[in-house]
Image (cartoon, rainbow, N blue to C red):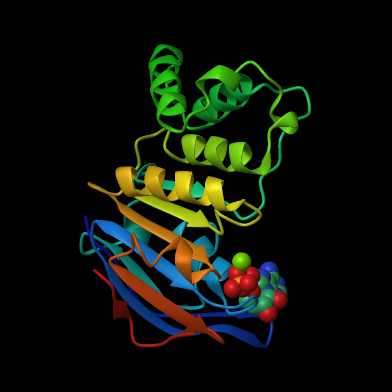
Amino acid sequence: MQLHMENIYKSFRDKEVLKGISVRMENGVYGLLGPNGAGKTTMIRILADILQPSKGQVFINGQDKNTCGDDYRAKIGYLPQEMNFYPDFSGWDYLRYIAALKGIPAGEARVRIIELTNSVGLTGDLRRRCIHYSGGMKRRLGIAQALLNDPQILILDEPTAGLDPQERIKFRNIISAFSKDRIVLLSTHIVSDVDSIAREIMMMEYGVIKKPRTVN
Ligand SMILES: Nc1ncnc2c1ncn2[C@@H]1O[C@H](COP(=O)(O)OP(=O)(O)O)[C@@H](O)[C@H]1O
Ligand SMILES: [Mg+2]
């Protein structure tokens, strides 16, 4: 799997937020590191196919994503920076709902939910209402929903925000395990979230990525 951004620009009205982003990613973990307002979420939303760039192209295995139709989104799992839950939903209800939105048949969804909740350590909590989950559990539920369609590209926007040190370690291990045969891109402003697991760290500032740093 190869994901490639070529000279991406994005402006909101007259404010230029991304100023010529070019990156190449292959399987493994990539850290997108930068202060608030740098443009991380904007870049991620372009990759998640929620925003269109003002200029530039995204290629998946060499093909322009805009010529891939639904095939592109089917390859992406996305955890947004903010997650919202219906107050009555249990973890199970939530995952069934997302699976339905992704068009996964019920039987298949059931098997997949059991598998994924086991790997993120939520099996015992599936029947509880997710508004009562801790911050860490919500994030792990978020990872599970992003992985429901078995995406080859996993994009996580500040997945460790608000987590305590123990949850951070748990999270790193989960991500590491999932990155073996996938591209995982995660944004953060905390270096220690990514420096032990990322193959590359991209430093973003004012809509520009400084020279990528290879870690491992
Ligand atoms: N929909 C939008 N309309 C106008 N400005 C936006 C919009 N989304 C983001 N921005 C601006 O773009 C800049 C980068 O934001 P963002 O991509 O969220 O950065 P980060 O995720 O690194 O904190 C900020 O100045 C923000 O205010
Ligand atoms: Mg952001």
Residue that appears at 66% across and 54% down: 162
Pick the residue in front: 106 or 54.
106
Residue 92 appears at what percent x and percent y? 58, 20
Looking at the rendering, which quadrant does residue 157 occupy? bottom right
Is residue 115 visible in the rendered image? The answer is yes
Q: Is residue 112 left or right of residue 122?
A: left
User: Depth check: 40 or 59 in front?
Assistant: 40
Q: Quadrant of residue 108?
A: top left
Residue 152 in sight here: no
Q: Nearer the viewer, residue 24 or 172?
A: 172
Q: Residue shown at 48%/81% (left/top)?
A: 204
Find residue 168 and report its horizontal and vertical position in percent: 52, 51
Residue 62, percent from left and from top: 21, 64
Q: Is residue 65 left or right of residue 2?
A: right
Say above or below: 91 vs 139.
above
| Image position of 125 (left or right of 179) | right
Looking at the image, in which quadrant does ligand 1 appear? bottom right
